[in-house]
Image: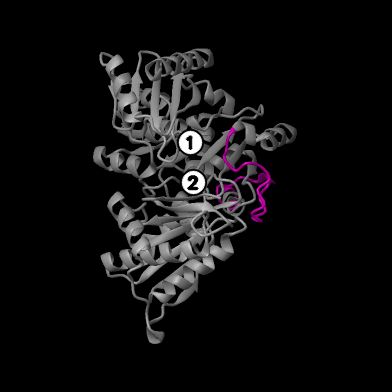
């Protein structure tokens, strides 16, 4: 059993003893701490909640709703929803914040509380720490019988979210309809099984093949949208002769595409393609991704005359950097598209609308589109270390070794070579260093990773 408390929320496995998993008591005290802080900060007694379809969702939702009502808060319950939908709903409702009940790409035994501020963005580092502290102190008062909060279900936000996508200048439903796409959707039996087909229909897609789209919460495969988990989608795309396949994670903030030949477009390239079209339409502009994302975004940005910026890993860090440099598009290489024209959060639905418009306007197959982008290949590894090892000191020694090579230490250590890079990050939860490399071939990426790992081990020994 696992329980992880962080500034962005609390997540853990269901079951087990208190403190060893996400227990009902943990859900209540963290919901209460969050509700107290955001309503005190804003003076607004309203919070939006929504959940993905995982099996523990209804139970966790009832605990959260009841706790917030006990604080005298009005709860707007979106029911089965998506992370980006809740992010959109918070400012629309003029609420103090929002809670999304989802463990994102984690397996079915996990659940989590993702916490939003009054703009529908993830709460700040300072607010996250305040929530964690107050949850441990449990120093908050509940309302008396006459001050209890209300609860209302609102099922209108599926359509509101679709309308937001349709209203984007970079989404052309007529062009998408004229392209006559045939699309297979794998939503891992979560809420994307409702939201993605509904969006595709609104965009004029007439042929939609659904696999794992019943929102039962019984995930038919590991929910992280990686090639090894999407064999059913690859098979269905080929068998149906489909134009492409779409896969999303349980809370629909990560997006990847399957090409017509059954090969993955590459989740790193989701943002690259969407950014390519947005930059083309805006006449250029700045972009942001995290340090572990593909260099292809930088190349595409510079092709359109813009400037690329890197941020520390984590959506809140990417959003902060995007605001700082006034980026027109950004996100993460895990298939997360952040498009400020809608809101500052990863949004698979917005990504789908822009990507299909790009594909329709270019008039090429998805595999032909992939060939137009710079070819990079990644290798992802980790080094297990002893708990007592000074990891920060180890990274400092690696930085000294490559002091004359362009590098960044805003998040671990990233070293930028001419045709490749390596990013070294320590884990916050276990004694390991993650080693991410990218190069112009898989062999070169693997070789670079092997070389760096040997250099690290030489320092340790």
For mark 1, does the 10 Å Cα neighbourhood hold few (<14), some (14 to 19), or many (20 or more) residues? many
State whether the magenta stretch is mostly helix, strand or loop: loop
- Rendered residue at 59%/59% (across/down): 56
Q: Residues within 10 Å of mark 2 (few under 14, many from 20)?
A: many
**Could you tell me residue 118's position as x and y percent?**
33, 60
The span picked out in magenta is 198-226
Task: Give the number of the disc on residue 143.
Answer: none
Identify which residue, 355 or 415, lies in the foreground.
Answer: 415
Q: Which residue matches tag 1?
A: 334
Residue tagged by mark 2?
253
Q: Position of residue 351 (x, y in %)?
A: 48, 41
- Residue 130: x and y, percent? 30, 57
Tell me the SS state at disc 1: loop
- Is 13 in front, or is 43? 13
Foreground residue among 127 and 227: 127
Tell me if residue 215 is in the magenta stretch. Answer: yes
Number of numbered discs on residues: 2
Could you say whether the residue bearing mark 2 is in a helix, strand or loop?
A: loop
**Residue 163 appears in the figure:** no
User: Is 300 above or below relative to 106?
Assistant: above
Q: Looking at the rendering, in which quadrant would you find the C terminus?
A: top left
What percent of the width, then of the height, locates residue 410?
Answer: 29, 32
- Residue at image location 53% in from the left, 44% down from the top: 174
């Amino acid at each position: 059993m696992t329980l992880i408390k962080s500034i962005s929320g609390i997540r853990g496995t269901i079951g087990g003893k208190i403190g060893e998993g996400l227990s009902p008591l943990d859900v209540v005290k963290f919901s209460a701490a969050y509700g107290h802080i955001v309503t005190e900060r804003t003076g607004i007694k309203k919070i939006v909640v929504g959940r993905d379809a995982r099996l523990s969702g209804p139970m966790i939702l009832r605990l959260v709703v009841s706790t917030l009502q006990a604080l005298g808060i009005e709860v707007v319950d979106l029911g089965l929803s998506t992370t980006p939908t809740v992010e959109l709903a918070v400012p629309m409702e003029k609420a103090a914040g929002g809670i999304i009940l989802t463990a994102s790409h984690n397996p079915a035994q996990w659940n989590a509380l993702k916490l939003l501020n009054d703009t529908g963005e993830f709460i700040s580092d300072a607010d996250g720490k305040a929530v964690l502290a107050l949850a441990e102190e449990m120093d908050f008062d509940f309302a008396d019988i006459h001050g209890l909060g209300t609860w209302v279900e609102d099922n209108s936000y599926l359509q509101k979210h679709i309308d937001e996508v349709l209203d984007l200048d970079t989404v052309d439903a007529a062009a998408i309809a004229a392209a006559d796409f045939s699309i297979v959707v794998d939503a891992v039996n979560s809420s994307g099984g409702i939201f993605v087909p509904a969006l595709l229909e609104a965009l004029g897609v007439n042929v939609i093949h659904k696999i794992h789209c019943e929102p039962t919460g019984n995930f038919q495969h590991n929910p992280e949208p990686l090639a090894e988990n999407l064999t059913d989608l690859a098979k269905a795309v080929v068998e149906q002769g489909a134009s492409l396949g779409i896969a999303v994670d349980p809370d629909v903030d990560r997006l990847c595409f399957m090409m017509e030949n059954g090969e993955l477009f590459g989740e790193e390239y989701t943002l690259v393609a969407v950014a390519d079209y947005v930059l083309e339409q805006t006449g250029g502009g700045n972009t942001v991704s995290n340090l572990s994302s593909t260099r292809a975004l930088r190349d595409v940005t510079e092709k359109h005359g813009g400037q690329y910026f890197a941020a520390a890993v984590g959506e809140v860090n990417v959003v902060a950097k995007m605001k700082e440099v006034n980026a027109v598009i950004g996100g993460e290489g895990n298939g997360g598209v952040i498009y400020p024209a809608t809101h500052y959060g990863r949004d698979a639905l917005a990504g789908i609308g822009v990507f299909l418009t790009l594909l329709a306007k270019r008039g090429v197959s998805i595999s032909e589109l992939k060939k137009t982008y710079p070819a990079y290949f990644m290798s992802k590894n980790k080094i297990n270390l002893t708990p007592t090892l000074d990891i920060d000191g180890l990274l400092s020694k690696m930085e000294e070794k490559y002091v004359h090579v362009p590098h960044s230490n805003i998040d671990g250590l990233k070293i930028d070579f001419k045709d490749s890079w390596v990013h070294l990050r320590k884990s916050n939860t276990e004694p390991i260093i993650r080693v991410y490399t990218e190069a112009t071939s898989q062999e070169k990426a693997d070789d670079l990773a092997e070389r760096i790992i040997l250099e690290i081990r030489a320092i340790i020994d």
